[in-house]
Amino acid sequence: MIFDKDGKTPIGHWCKVSFKKTTNEKTGILASYPICYGRTDGKSIWAEYEVVDNMLKFEMIKKAGAWVTVNEEVIEEVKKDTGEDFKQQHQGMDNLRRYFEENPKIGKYLFNKFIEVLKKS
């Protein structure tokens, strides 16, 4: 379960999928992705959550206490490619996720960028 800041209210969960048979004959592969409650029309996969997780994994953001800072190179790339201003500091991971929900052009750009990079690997 994924809980709100109060730690009591569930706002999502992790969905786990096990692949039994695939075209490349790999079996038993387990994939998981976050689901956000309250979304409809096929938008329940929590892409903003995945973007923040991947930004942390690829060191595009740094955590220091309660603050999250976005690397300057990422801000410049987003500005160049989308024309959007990307705020550099956010108080907590939840606020960064919320920022992507409120600025879908930036979130979608980064999501597509991760898909493009991961397809190559």
Image: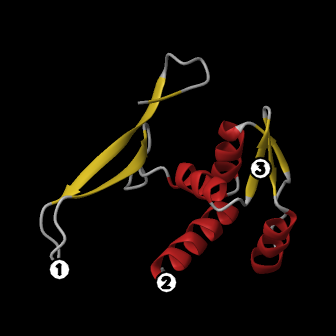
Q: CA distance from mark 3 to mark 1?
A: 38 Å
Q: Which residue is mark 2?
A: 120
What amino acid type is highlighted by mark number 3?
A: Lys
Label 2 vs 3, first from the N-terminus? 3
Label 1 neighbour load within 10 Å: few <14, some 14-19, many 20+: few
Q: CA distance from mark 2 to mark 3?
A: 25 Å
Camera-side residue of 65 and 14 = 65
Which quadrant of the rendered structure holds the N terminus?
top left
Label 3 vs 1, first from the N-terminus? 1
Above or below residue 78? Residue 1 is above
Q: CA distance from mark 2 to mark 1?
A: 18 Å
Res 40 seen here? no
Residue at the image point whose x is 71% and y is 48% from the top: 99
Q: Which residue is mark 3?
A: 62
Q: Is residue 89 left or right of residue 95?
A: right
Task: Please state the horizontal and vertical placement of residue 121, each as a whole percent of the image.
Answer: 48, 79
Task: Please state the horizontal and vertical placement of residue 37, each as a whole percent of the image.
Answer: 42, 37
Camera-side residue of 76 and 44 = 76
Q: Which residue is mark 1?
A: 23
Q: Residue 71 lies in what quarter of the image?
A: bottom right
What amino acid type is highlighted by mark number 2?
A: Lys
Could you tell me which secondary element the residue under label 3 belongs to? strand
Camera-side residue of 56 and 106 = 56
What amino acid type is highlighted by mark number 1?
A: Thr
Label 2 vs 1, first from the N-terminus? 1
Residue at the image point whose x is 61% and y is 56% from the top: 57
Could you tell me which secondary element the residue under label 1 belongs to? loop
Label 2 neighbour load within 10 Å: few <14, some 14-19, many 20+: few
Residue at the image point whose x is 29% and y is 47% from the top: 16
Q: Is residue 3 left or right of residue 44?
A: right
